[in-house]
Amino acid sequence: MNADPDDSLFGPLAPERPGEWALSLAVPADPGHLDELRGDGAHGLAPSWSAFFDHTGTEGLADLNRRAENLQRQIRDNGVTYNVYADDSGLQRPWALDLFPMILGPSDWAQIEAGVLQRARLLNAVMADLYGPRELLQRGLLPAALVQGHPGYLRAMQGVRPRGGTWLHIVGFDLAHGPDGRWWVVGQRTQAPSGLGYLLENRIAIGRQFPKAFAGLRVQRLAASYRALMDGIKSLAPEGENARIALLTPGPYNETYFEHAYLARYLGLTLVEGNDLTVRDERLFLKTLAGLEPVHALIKRVDDQWLDPLELRPDSTLGVPGLLQVLRAGHLVLANAPGSAPLESSALLGFLPAISEHLLGEPLALPSLATWWCGEDAALRGVLPLLKDGVIKATYPGGGPDTVIGQGLTPREIDEWTGRLVRQPEQHTVQSWLPLSQTPTWTGDRLMPRSAMLRVFALADGAGSWRVLPGGLVRLAPRGQLVAAMQRGGSSADCWVLTDGAVDHTSLLRSQPGSFAIAQQKQPVTSRAAENLFWLGRYTERAENTVRLAETVLDQLDGEEPGTQALLAWLTEVSRENALVLADVPDALLSSRVFARSLMANLAPHPQDPAAASSFSVGFNLGALANAAAQVRERLSREHWNLIERLQTGFAAGAARLLDNGELSTGGTQLLLQEASQQLAAITGSQTDRMVRDDGWRLLSIGRHIERLATLSRALALGLQSGSVHEPAGFEAMVALFDSTITFHAQYQQRRDMVALIDLLVLDRDNPRSLAWVVQTLRARLARLGQSVAPQDAELARGLPDPAGWQLAELSNWQRDADGRRVWGALLRLLEDCEAAAVELSDEITRLHFSHADRRSQTLSI
């Protein structure tokens, strides 16, 4: 899109003055707020923003709407999400990212960097004191009630000294830019600070939209800080450079799970949940297909109290029994060390100036907002008259609303809050109100100011040493609101830190000049990931089978000629066994119309009736497929995950539309099933061609073929027992269910005899839908798994029927029973053996690979 001087959006301004164009579109910041676009209040643009628009140019400004659309498309395509627990519309929503970054000049960043580095050292020293000599409590620099009364103070950590004396490897500081141009600390996050993954995705996405401005403004890069963090952790770990580092996540239902998976992939870490880990002899191990492998460092994204059910919350399923014992023994670097929750309390900010003088011998370089902990009588009396101009916060988690702004309270509400503070003073902290600076955002035709808060990170790069990531996560408040929080509908922006010096082009890709050897550390396949991959394969195959079966049933029931008794009996039985209809639905022979409508009505649960969700039909299988994929999302390509997500949501929406229309249509349902079939074919292609063929992939493939063997064997056996395969329509339906229609007619033309059917669907080792091909593939996968994981896998292959002994003449032999019906004795026995072998193989794989529990009880050393 080229700039047009007469464009109604920009007006007839001269194209050589893009800054003036931008300024003419910019709504000023609200009174009392610093305007980041205009800087210190001058009428023109701040120098950094003026340079940004100069580099963007007139054509770039005229192209903003297209860039905004590209940005949103990129976010959707990359699957960037932020989960909201209380969101009734669904667990996942796309990450909200604005087009324009916040830009910080070198002087602003120098102020922030110095203050954040000092505070990282200070908070680490506070931790060391709280769980060591406790001088701060003895000297009264910190009230004992504030620390020891905090539910996150962990007495189990008393006397522990983490490796290298580093308690805090990652610290997040929430900063606000005040009207006076100073940066203020509003809060700090130390347990499991979020944002390191999202800000990286923000950087990549926004950098692509403004490549000229990004390069021309000399924006400092981020990779060097991430590498320093990893090097710092390894330097403290027991195994040094060879240490195995894992990232502990609560799982895919956590609100920030996307960035857990994103960070693990970016940093080359193993993403684990609590049940992936186990403790043996005061050491931490990862449960993998190959057995237990040691873990030497753990970056946790789980809050402290959930880490160890033996010593902390006994109801936790997110942690690892015995984890604190490993930490005490010095066999693990845990980032961050448990017990830092009291540092996150807003009340601490009021005590840090004196603590800094005591522990560091220097005043705070970066000020905190004035803060009063109401648990002190003098502070309570002094702050009560100031509530109208303050912000009320909970001292402890769960102690009340996180943030209540006094300016928004009525006189009656002020009185109510006064009474609450007097009754429960220690539960509340009051902080002075600071109008947040407002940064420009793009709305489609204007630059609108929105209140912003910046989270920056201090990362430990060695023992007692930190560096500040040159950038941060900007959180934007919704227009007209004062609090910048993602949970309240806010959005995010990138943060560009400009430098006067050289831009650091460090990469996380390590290289050794002159060396042609590539050392590759393969990521282990955890038992949990293996199990989910196994079921991902099974549910993918199961979804394909049920979609194809539903299409076949509707085709037969909607035909011009009524189905025969044998065909309708087969359709009824195979539909019930694959959960396409409820058990109490009349047989298709009694009412084919009722049977077809029941099948269509149960394709997917209606979104307005969550209770209707059950283990029935296509919709359930697609949901189970998506759930299994979500558990191993870090192992899937972006396209693979997007296909699965779009299939599940699209199918549910399509089924709901059919139900909402009030009249179920066979044609509409068939179209929906055809679209699902096409998407499933693409998912199968991703699993075949877009995944590394490691042991996890082999289990996925084994899962698919176990499902295929059991389903098709049973369907063919039912067809023989009902006699439907001896009729033209039933014959064609069986070939269609085996997805072999084109192959059959190409090889056998117009033949419809059982010899041809058995040859193609049972014996043909070149047909991936034949039972012989499925069995020989299972044998090959198990043999390969036996070479790399456990010899027992190769032994499992012996429990499968051997296609080498299958003979067409024997399987084609039949006899008539007393009623004159054909009985296919050898073929039915083979089909029953195949189905039973598939079930037994699934059970044996589960027993062998998906748990490493032993009979030793886990005990705590005292």
Image (cartoon, helix red, strand yellow):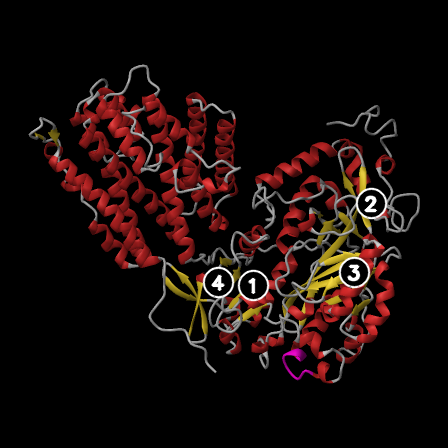
Mark 1 = which residue? 300
Residue 169 is situated, as x and y percent measured from the top left of the image, at 63, 67
Secondary structure character of the magenta stretch overall: loop
Asked whether, in this view, residue 203 is left or right of residue 14, the answer is left
| Residues shaded magenta | 129-134
Q: Amino acid at mark 3?
A: Glu
Q: Which residue is mark 2?
A: 49
Q: Nearer the viewer, mark 3 or mark 2?
A: 3
Residue at which label 3 appears? 416
Give the residue at mark 4.
317
Q: Tell whether position 194 is magenta.
A: no
How dense is the environment of label 3, judged by Cα within 10 Å: few (below 14), some, or many (20 and up)? few
Q: Position of residue 629 (x, y in %)?
A: 46, 46
Dot 2, how many residues are within 10 Å of its Cα: few (below 14), some (14-19), or many (20+)? many
Residue at 63 percent across and 45 percent down: it is: 95
Q: How many marks?
A: 4
Dots 3, 2 in contact, CB < 8 A: no
